[in-house]
Amino acid sequence: PSPRLRVERKRPPSPLGRLCHARPEYALAADEDLVAPTSTSDTKVFMPEGDPSVHVGMIDLGVNAGLIRYFVRLAGAKVTLLTANEKPDMGLYDCVVVSTGPGNPAQHPKMIEWIKEHVSDLTSKPLLGLGLGCQIMALAIGCTVQRLHLGQRGTNQPVLDLRTHNCMTTTQNYGYAVDSSSLPKNWATLFTHVNRGTCEGIV
């Protein structure tokens, strides 16, 4: 068989690993909380050059700097970066973003409960989940989130917008996906992965 086929046969599902210059002090555990060491430890505020168009509260589960730059520079938003354990006061923001980050979405029961309370309030402000944030939101509305065999990693990942049928290239690095067949009434799949058919977003 080809070298690629040999690797696929021998590789275990969703292996935990990292690139190191030297032997690490400890091994990664499957149930380890990967958000805590990557989230901000205190609140930070990022301002655009002019008057902000909106005020975004962003719950940091391991957000990358590029996402903050997008909201601040391109959208002209004021972004308040919140800690992973913080329950935001919705009255202070025009919308709240639950950021992307590493790990298993089921490891955040407090966040899931807070989102349950929020989405049940029809007068509440917009809530957006990205990556891990989207998976946590899916659990909050009663969906199943499944662990992928090998995860979806890398650049130029094609994602289809089911409203417009436009295809976008994205960067992805996650090992879980929302099971679209478990979506409750009044919820629908918004984006799908072109190659794998997995759910990439819900609305």
Image: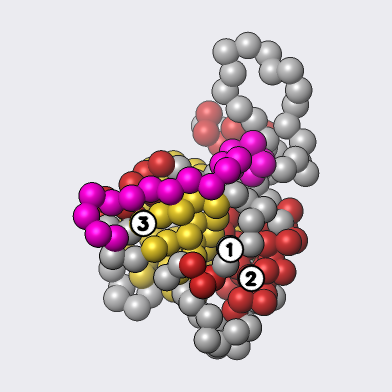
Instruction: Name the residue type under label 1.
Output: Pro
Point out residue 143 in the picture as x, y percentages from the top left corner: 66, 73
The segment highlighted magenta reads 34-52
10 Å crowding of disc 3: few (<14), some (14-19), many (20+):
many
Q: Earlier in the sequence, mark 1 or mark 2?
A: 1
Mark 3 lies on a secondary structure that is: strand
- Which dot, 1 or 2, sits closer to the camera? 1
The N terminus sits in image quarter: top right
User: Residue 78 has which mark?
Assistant: 3
Q: CA distance from mark 1 to mark 3?
A: 15 Å
User: Residue 115 has which mark?
Assistant: 2
**Majority secondary structure in the magenta region:** loop
The residue under the point 71% across, 56% down is 108
From the viewer's perspective, tell me whether residue 65 is left or right of residue 148: left
- Give 73 or 90, whichever is nearer the viewer: 90
User: Residue 88 has which mark?
Assistant: 1
